[in-house]
Image: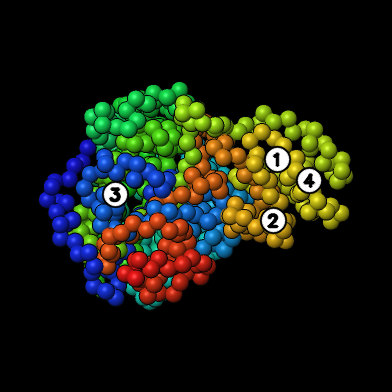
Amino acid sequence: MNTLPTAALCFLCALPLVAHAGDKPKLILQITVDQLRGDMPARHADQLGQGGLRYLMEQGIHYNNAHHTHANTETIVGHTTLATGANPAAHGMVGNLWYDREAGRTVYNIEDPDYAILTSGADVDDATEIDPTQRAANSDGRSPRTILTSTFGDELAVNTAGQAKVFGVSIKDRGAVAMAGHAGKAIWFSKAAGEFVTSTYYYDAYPDWVDAWNEKGLPQSFSGQSWELLNPISGYLFADRDDQEWEPDFAGFGRTFPHPLGTTEDKYFTTLLTLSPYGDRITADFAKTLIDAEDLGDDDVTDFLGVSFSVTDYVGHFFGPSSLEAEDNLLQLDRTLADLFAYVDAEVGLDNTLIVLSSDHGAPEAPGYLASLGMPGSYVSPDEWDTAPAAARIKERFGITGPLLEGYDHPYLNLAEEVRANPDIDRVALETAIANELVAFEGVAYAIPSTRLQEGSVPDNALMQAVLNNYHPDRSGDIYVVFEPDSFINDMDGLSVTVTHGSPWRYDTFVPIFFAGQGITPQTVSRRVHTIDVALTLSVVAQTRPPSGATGQVLTEVLGQ
């Protein structure tokens, strides 16, 4: 366990409440904590140390009523929304996966065969992957070319004639790529290779400092270790919930502390590493190396570093957000953030840095946890539905002899290509008929035909607006499926998990937004704000053009107004 000396935290004592008004920050540090629901920092506030989340809560602006405005609350969707200030209807990232009608297959959001990963063998290894959405990729190539609008980082590069240094770093490739945008450099951790990698979109060869970081073998140094509790168990809110029957035992990781990582000889070692707080620790260490090697914040041109911490998401999927594991991971992430902020203060100065922290999505509770409190919650199992009678009725009514559906890529149901191409079929009537049949199945709250979205003939309410905000005509499927609150599919491409996100319900849209550092007056703001506001606010701070698809509002408190 790395600990910070007291001296490393003394920067808190010297921070000005209001820094040089009108000055551009030397560094904008945008942190995205994957699956950090908006209530989680406050729930554990009295357990936090100094310098991390407590610094943001006490020395920053805390927007405690912030929400995504799109319906499919998945990783790439939220990251891209935070980066662009646009909804998926504009930026195009409608899901982690979508059915590409031209290619005739399901695609992974940032796959790009034109830009291979520089490290041989760093593509997804199905046997060790806890992020199975990547398995749909047709190649190991990665780029931001599927992002259809500009990001804040892009506009910063435009504004500075390319002098601004723009980077994105994450365990997840899509987290790094979304933050880096088109003009920046994205670097992410490969579980297959056990090191940070990138693609030829960004570099022809690795910079020396990346090679040096990989050669020092920090991930491998955790071989043979276990994830231990940070503090004595008696101080935890969920101290008596360390062994819950709904938690899976993935690859011998266990349901109780300590959680063994195994050794580098085990095929699941790097996977389990990223299912522990050590995954965020190596991400932060890499980010610190990047700041030093690339001289971020060393001149008067504003630089940008986006860091996405992924472990909260992995832990949430396996154990749920109300678990001893999620609680301890948040406390350990708090220490990792404190260490990173102390490093930024020493290298750049927090009075020269604007920090913004938010999340790509929230999370539901595990149905088992809700049941223990007498509350409803359930897993949805479409494989157990008897769909044959409904399919037969629809095919008979519309004269369909072949397949009716192509399949389901969350949250969209896709019609078979032969059906879509048949000019004799009334698509509005067909999609409406399928939707009407779907809502009769257990767990389905709404089924919204895309033809209705195109026509604008859906009810005028917040949920339908969120579905409309997620609609892109070239990428969205034919029927958007919304499950009942606290009901969801817990099968991620064959991998059984405790919790999945991706709904328009408030537990999935609810995230924190913090701003801290240069020019920030501490305060808590409880009016409703949105994640589409972040990029536009950064553009005003840095005096750039707004990102091309941005539709949010400027968060005026960040400007001292």
Residue name at image x 29 percent, y 38 percent = 220
**Marks 3 and 4, how far apart at CA:** 49 Å
Would you place residue 349 above or below residue 322 in this image? Answer: below
Name the amino acid type tagged 1.
Answer: Val
| Labels 3, 2: front one | 2
**Marks 3 and 2, how far apart at CA:** 41 Å
Q: Earlier in the sequence, mark 2 or mark 1?
A: 1
Q: Residues within 10 Å of mark 1 (few under 14, many from 20)?
A: some
Q: Is residue 9 left or right of residue 39?
A: left
Closer to the camera in the image, 532 or 392:
532
**Marks 2 and 1, how far apart at CA:** 16 Å
Q: Is residue 94 left or right of residue 104?
A: left
Q: Secondary structure at mark 1?
A: loop
Residue name at image x 61 percent, y 40 percent = 483
Q: Secondary structure at mark 4?
A: helix
| Labels 2, 4: front one | 2
Q: Is residue 559 visible?
A: yes
Name the amino acid type tagged 3.
Answer: Leu
The residue to which callout 1 is attached is: 439
Q: Residues within 10 Å of mark 2 (few under 14, many from 20)?
A: some
The residue to which callout 4 is attached is: 433
Q: Earlier in the sequence, mark 3 or mark 2?
A: 3
Residue name at image x 43 percent, y 64 percent = 535
Name the amino acid type tagged 4.
Answer: Ala
The residue to which callout 2 is attached is: 458
Image coordinates for residue 190, horizontal then vertical, percent: 40, 45
**Marks 1 and 3, how far apart at CA:** 42 Å
Image coordinates for residue 89, horizontal then vertical, percent: 59, 60
Q: Earlier in the sequence, mark 1 or mark 3?
A: 3
Closer to the camera in the image, 526 or 318:
526
**Marks 2 and 4, how far apart at CA:** 15 Å
